[in-house]
Amino acid sequence: MKMLLIVCPESRKQNVRELVEKHDVHAYSEIGRVTGEGLTGKKFGDKVWPGESVILFTVIPDAKRDELLAALRQCEESLYPEEGMAAFVLPVEEVL
């Protein structure tokens, strides 16, 4: 199993939710109002560095990994250059 951790712009969270659900993943968690700095610059939710991100994470079977990453790559291509999105795949050793 893998954990898929997705960081996306706040304004695109509904698109990412729908994409994940479209691929038969119906169990995920979301953390809102995420701030930080990445390849597309700083996003601290203030006047100087506007914008915030959302982190969505889910645990998926290994077989879903490539399918979801391909869909997320397509989604990323539709974003404006300053928006940016990242996805990380982490191993899951055990689920309770």
Image: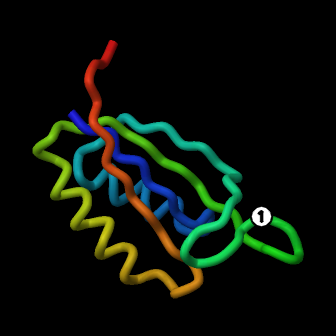
Residue at x 26%, y 66% (from the top left corner): 71
Residue at x 52%, y 87% (from the top left corner): 81
Residue sticking out furthest to the bottom: 81
Residue 61 versus residue 24 in the image, above or below: above
Residue 66 versus residue 4 in the image, above or below: below
User: What's the amino acid at mark 1?
Assistant: Phe
Residue 77, image quadrant: bottom left
Residue position marked by numbered label 1 in the rendering: 44
Q: Quadrant of the C terminus?
A: top left
Query: Is 61 on the left-hand or right-hand side of 56?
Result: left
Q: Nearer the viewer, residue 76 or 24?
A: 76
Q: Give percent across and percent down for residue 67.
A: 17, 58
Q: Give percent across and percent down for residue 31.
A: 60, 43
Residue at x 44%, y 54% (from the top left corner): 6
Task: Name the secondary structure under disc 1.
Answer: loop
Query: Is 89 on the left-hand or right-hand side of 29?
Result: left
Q: Quadrant of the N terminus?
A: top left
Residue at x 65%, y 66% (from the top left corner): 37
Residue sticking out furthest to the right: 47
Q: Give percent across and percent down for residue 28.
A: 42, 38
Residue sticking out furthest to the left: 63
Residue 57, image quadrant: top left
Residue 19 versus residue 79 in the image, above or below: above
Q: Residues within 10 Å of mark 1 (few under 14, many from 20)?
A: some
Query: Is 46 on the left-hand or right-hand side of 90?
Result: right
Q: Give percent across and percent down for residue 88.
A: 37, 53
